[in-house]
């Protein structure tokens, strides 16, 4: 095992023999020239080592220079998930919704045009210039190739969605698939219908403000529950029905405050008391002395560490993985095998330092690419193979910087580029955050690694509203983009403070659809749409007082930070690893004590 110092935050991190074995496994292999043509000094710098066998050469990927957190932060700085803007399509001039604000210097096409044969990304291809660093040439290509306005697919009547597919009648849903009549969903929401303001919810219907919930029906304010109906304000309840203000229950009906009631008594209390005016915060504060929290959320898994891991095996320091095997330092993935340092992937294997790369094999240092094989340093490529440094290509093979080559030409030139990148210290690094097309404050990185503009100093001003910054103090050396762009708010009849809204939904007039509400936290105005108002009226819910972005942050804040602490089980006293810091007041049990208590 080798201990290294992160070049960004200066924290120590370890590189294990298992890690080195993986880097060797995913390193690219190319056909070699004849032995007489092989330079004796091949091997480059920065730990790059070349192996020769059967006239094949492997270019070893060196160990990372950043700690796992900084590697994740860098990848997430390329993910604008929730920020949508109005702008013009640069092909047709038509008004469109886009993840690229109008001030950004990118050519943005409507999706229908982008996926058509009306243009060709190979038109922008260029030869590699060995007098320049790779990332400089890549960025020059990046700002010239047209980008689609959104990252979505096969949605019906769902124009304000991103990183989402196969949805119908959905609005402001992100990371959402196969859902219908849903609003304000985010973070892997699948197969839902008629749900609003939920995070990580699957196979559910008619739900409101639920987090980490599966198979729920007619529920409100649930957290970490499954197979549950007609219930609200519940935590860790499974196979339950008609439960209110309950926690740690299994196979229960007609319970309030964890007290078993007769059916008629339950409905009498419900008819007399309005639970809709409560909040998650009230519920958890009231129940803090009684709820038992499991140290880590791992189920049906073997040899797994960190949190929210299901049906997986051999998982190291990873978060939110399902049905995955032999993965490390990875986040938010499904059906992944033998991979490291990925964020937001779906299906297949041998990924290293990738973000949102789905249904792909043997890809490294690549962002938002789907159904590919053998990609290195690529952005947004689809149904392709053997690409290096390419952007927005579809159904292509053996291309470098969007220029087409033969297989023989490709396998001759790419090793030369890798050798060049070894000398410039670029080989083995994901794209620098300063190359992101988004401001750091527009991306998911801001949710997990928040920064304030007051903490930053401007290095250079790219446009009137887009600037490259670094942290003013400390050891943090990461350069980032920052956006000051504020989208103009639509004209409305009036803007009313949230405090002026009636509590009772029956007192809300239809005219609210023509108004804007001033968020009680951020003071940012937001609107209510017709589909949303109908939902609140149908389920007797109050109009929200907070902007949708703030409501999303509120839900995210209920989930523990992605950090493991050492503390003692509050039942047996043994030392445990958990996402609950030792000073927090929650009752936290080790897995054995938790299961004995709850089941």
Image (tube, rainbow, N blue to C red):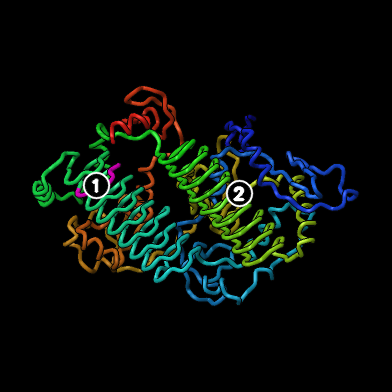
Can residue 562 be seen? Answer: no
Which quadrant would residue 53 be assigned to in this image? top right
Going by the image, does 393 lie left or right of 85? right
Asked whether residue 259 is drawn in magenta, I would say no
- Which residue occupies the foreground of this view, 294 or 554? 294
Q: Which mark is residue 240?
A: 1
Magenta residue span: 235-242
Q: How many tags in the picture? A: 2
Residue that protrudes farthest toward the right in the picture: 36
Residue 557, image x and y in percent? 37, 44
Marks 2 and 1, how far apart in space?
40 Å
SS for tag 1? strand
Q: Residues within 10 Å of mark 1 (few under 14, many from 20)?
A: many
Q: Which mark is residue 253?
A: none
Residue 382, image x and y in percent? 59, 63
Question: In terms of secondary structure, what is the magenta stretch mainly?
Answer: strand
Picture residue at 72% right of the left edge, 43% below the top: 60
| Residue underneath mark 2 | 350
């Amino acid at each position: 095992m080798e201990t290294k110092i992160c070049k960004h935050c200066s924290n120590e991190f370890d590189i294990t023999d298992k890690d080195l074995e993986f880097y060797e496994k995913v390193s690219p292999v190319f056909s070699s020239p004849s032995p007489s043509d092989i330079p004796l000094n091949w091997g480059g710098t920065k730990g790059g080592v070349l192996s020769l066998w059967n006239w094949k050469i492997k270019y070893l990927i060196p160990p990372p220079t950043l700690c796992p957190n900084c590697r994740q932060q860098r990848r997430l700085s390329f993910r604008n998930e929730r920020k949508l803007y109005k702008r013009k399509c640069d092909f047709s001039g038509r008004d469109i919704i886009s993840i690229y604000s109008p001030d950004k210097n990118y050519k943005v096409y409507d999706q229908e045009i982008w996926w058509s044969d009306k243009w060709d990304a190979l038109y922008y291809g260029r030869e590699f210039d060995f007098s320049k660093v790779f990332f400089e040439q890549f960025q020059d290509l990046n700002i010239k190739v047209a980008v689609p306005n959104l990252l979505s697919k096969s949605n019906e009547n769902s124009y304000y969605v991103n990183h989402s597919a196969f949805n119908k009648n959905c609005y402001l849903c992100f990371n959402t698939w196969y859902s219908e009549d849903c609003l304000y969903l985010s973070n892997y929401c699948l197969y839902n219908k008629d749900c609003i303001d939920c995070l990580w919810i699957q196979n559910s219907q008619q739900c409101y403000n639920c987090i980490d919930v599966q198979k729920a029906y007619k529920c409100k304010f649930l957290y970490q529950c499954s197979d549950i109906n007609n219930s609200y304000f519940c935590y860790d309840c499974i196979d339950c029905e008609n439960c209110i203000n309950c926690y740690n229950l299994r196979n229960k009906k007609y319970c309030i405050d964890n007290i078993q009631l007769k059916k008629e008594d339950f409905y009498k209390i419900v008819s007399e008391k309005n639970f809709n005016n409560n909040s998650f915060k009230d519920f958890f504060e009231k129940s803090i002395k009684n709820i038992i929290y499991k140290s880590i959320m791992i189920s049906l898994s073997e040899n797994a560490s960190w949190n929210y891991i299901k049906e997986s095996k051999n998982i190291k320091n990873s978060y939110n993985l399902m049905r995955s095997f032999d993965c490390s330092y990875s986040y938010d993935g499904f059906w992944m095998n033998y991979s490291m340092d990925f964020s937001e992937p779906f299906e297949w294997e041998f990924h290293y330092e990738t973000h949102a790369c789905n249904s792909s094999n043997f890809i490294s240092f690549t962002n938002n690419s789907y159904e590919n094989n053998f990609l290195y340093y690529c952005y947004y490529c689809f149904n392709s193979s053997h690409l290096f440094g390419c952007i927005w290509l579809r159904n292509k093979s053996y291309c470098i910087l969007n220029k087409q080559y033969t297989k023989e030409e490709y396998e001759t030139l790419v090793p030369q580029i890798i050798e060049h990148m070894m000398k410039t210290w670029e080989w083995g690094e994901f794209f620098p955050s300063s190359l992101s097309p988004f401001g750091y404050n527009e991306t998911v990185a801001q949710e997990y690694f928040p920064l304030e503009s007051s903490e930053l100093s401007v290095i250079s001003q790219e446009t009137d509203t887009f600037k490259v910054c670094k942290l003013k103090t400390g050891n943090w050396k990461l350069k980032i983009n920052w956006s000051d762009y504020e989208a103009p708010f639509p004209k409305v009849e009036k803007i009313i403070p949230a405090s002026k809204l009636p509590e009772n939904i029956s007192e809300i007039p239809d005219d609210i659809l023509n108004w804007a509400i001033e968020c009680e936290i951020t003071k940012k105005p937001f609107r209510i749409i017709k589909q949303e108002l109908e939902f609140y009226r149908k389920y007797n819910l109050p109009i929200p007082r907070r902007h949708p972005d703030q409501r999303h942050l509120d839900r995210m804040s209920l989930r523990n930070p992605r950090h493991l602490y050492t503390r003692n089980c509050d039942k047996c006293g043994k030392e445990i690893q958990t996402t609950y810091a030792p000073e927090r007041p929650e009752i936290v049990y080790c897995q054995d004590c938790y299961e004995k208590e709850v089941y």
